[in-house]
Amino acid sequence: MTIRPIPAQPEVVIYSVAELDRRLKRAVEGASANVWVEGEISGAKPAPSGHVYFCLKDEREDAMIECVMYRSSAFRARRLIVDGARVQLRGRATLWAPRGRLQFMADVARPAGRGALLEALENLKQRLLEEGLFAPERKRPLPPHPAVVGVVTSAAGAAIHDIAKVAFRRGGVRIVLSSTMVQGAAAAARVIRAIDRLERMPDLEVIIIGRGGGSVEDLMVFNDEEVVRRVAACRVPVVSAVGHEVDMTLTDLAADARAATPSQAAELVVADSRAQRQQLLHGKTRLMRAMRSRLAEDRAALHALQTSVVHLRLSVAEREQEVDDLSQRLEQCARRTLGRRRSELERLHRRLAARHPRTVLATSRAELSPLFVRLSSAERAVVETARAVVERKWARLEALSPLAVLARGYAIASTEDGRAVRSADEVAAGQEVSIRVHRGRFAARVLADEGPASGEKTS
């Protein structure tokens, strides 16, 4: 038995999810850089960040790709990225890793096919708006109870049946159909002729123009400029009921009123006779109830007036008594007020008399007389006290005065320069001195110096 070796298995490479996403992203972006793609926009949704997310569909095949246009590019193309528009986008395909989702990042958009048609439609709408064709003040009110209603639509469509069914159910009205094509290249001229036929009816009161739902191309006849201008020029009010509620055409803007569907247009134009009857009955009931209530109120008011007339004299007497009471109270109040004013006046007179100049002067004189006596007495007392003090000081001064010593027989000898001689040593024999005695002065000459006497001290 021969044993053969088992061949080596090739090594298996395992990627992470993130690595696989990155590889796919590089492969997709490398193969689709700056490519142009054309399709129909669906589900356009602007985000708060300014980016726009939408899908681009292929009308001929069942194919779709998710797209994103970032804020910087979306701002320039915001009028093109709308549902139903056919556009051409330039960008590149990429893989958004967080969701593993393939998407097309567009940076340039331009209209193509039906998108170009929508752009032309928007330009026409703006031009007619500037002319005032859609102005609210041009809108006319619908007649409340029309007898003849004209309808411009196809005789084979469901719109006329819906209008007639609702109109006949709501009330008696005459429906006049002016049949026309409502789609196709020749439909615009047919619609205008249908309106002309209806306007030749003298008793026509209102026109309903419209059709059922359809694609944008099917409704383009109601965006035709000639049709829009003819609707705006109708001599009677026009109700536009084109397509479904989500559909909006220029005819809707030019008409006097817009209905979401042909059935709703019939409801707007034809009043509901049953509802009107119910409203009349309800109004009659409310009117009768109000009349009965008003009669009851008037009857009660009349009874009250009659009662007031019967008791008129008593009422007058009561009012006269009130007047008498008020007059008495007024008189008492006047007397009290007059008494208070008189007392106040007398008090002011007394205050004024007390402040009269004569009274003030007399009072001041009476107050000054004792003050003058007190001042004189105080003056004499001060003078006597001062005199006694002066006399005491004079006596002391006299006791210390050298003149008093001189009066007792003493004398003062002074040299020629005026110095008093206090010692015999201060003079010499033959020197002249001046001798001051109690009364007068005389000159003397020193004959001899005997020196100080016994018992005397020399200084």
Image (cartoon, helix red, strand yellow):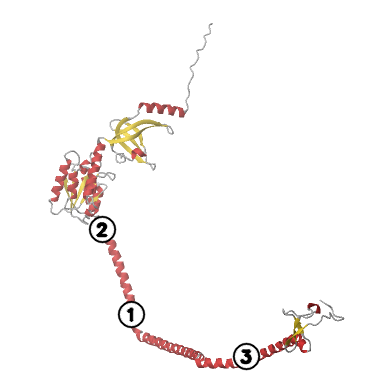
Q: Which residue is mark 1?
A: 305
Q: Position of residue 406 (x, y in %)?
A: 76, 87
Q: Which residue is mark 3?
A: 375
Task: Name which residue type carries label 1.
Answer: Leu
Q: Earlier in the sequence, mark 1 or mark 2?
A: 2
Q: Position of residue 366 (x, y in %)?
A: 57, 93
Outermost residue on the right side: it is 454
Q: Which residue is mark 2?
A: 276
Q: CA distance from mark 1 to mark 3?
A: 95 Å
**Placement of 414 over or under 360, stated as above or below:** above
Q: CA distance from mark 1 to mark 2?
A: 42 Å
Which label number is shown at residue 224? none
Q: Quadrant of the N terminus?
A: top right
Decide if residue 161 is in sight here: no
Element marked by disc 1? helix
Q: Is residue 331 left or right of residue 55?
A: right
Q: CA distance from mark 2 to mark 3?
A: 120 Å
Decide if residue 202 is in sight here: yes
Q: Is residue 354 left or right of residue 40?
A: right
Graded by Cα atoms within 10 Å as few (under 14), some (14 to 19) or many (20 or more), the crowding at tag 3 reads few
Element marked by disc 3? helix
Q: Are marks 2 and 3 in contact (CB under 8 Å)?
A: no
Nearer the camera: disc 1 or disc 3: 3
Q: Quadrant of the C terminus?
A: bottom right
Q: Earlier in the sequence, mark 1 or mark 3?
A: 1
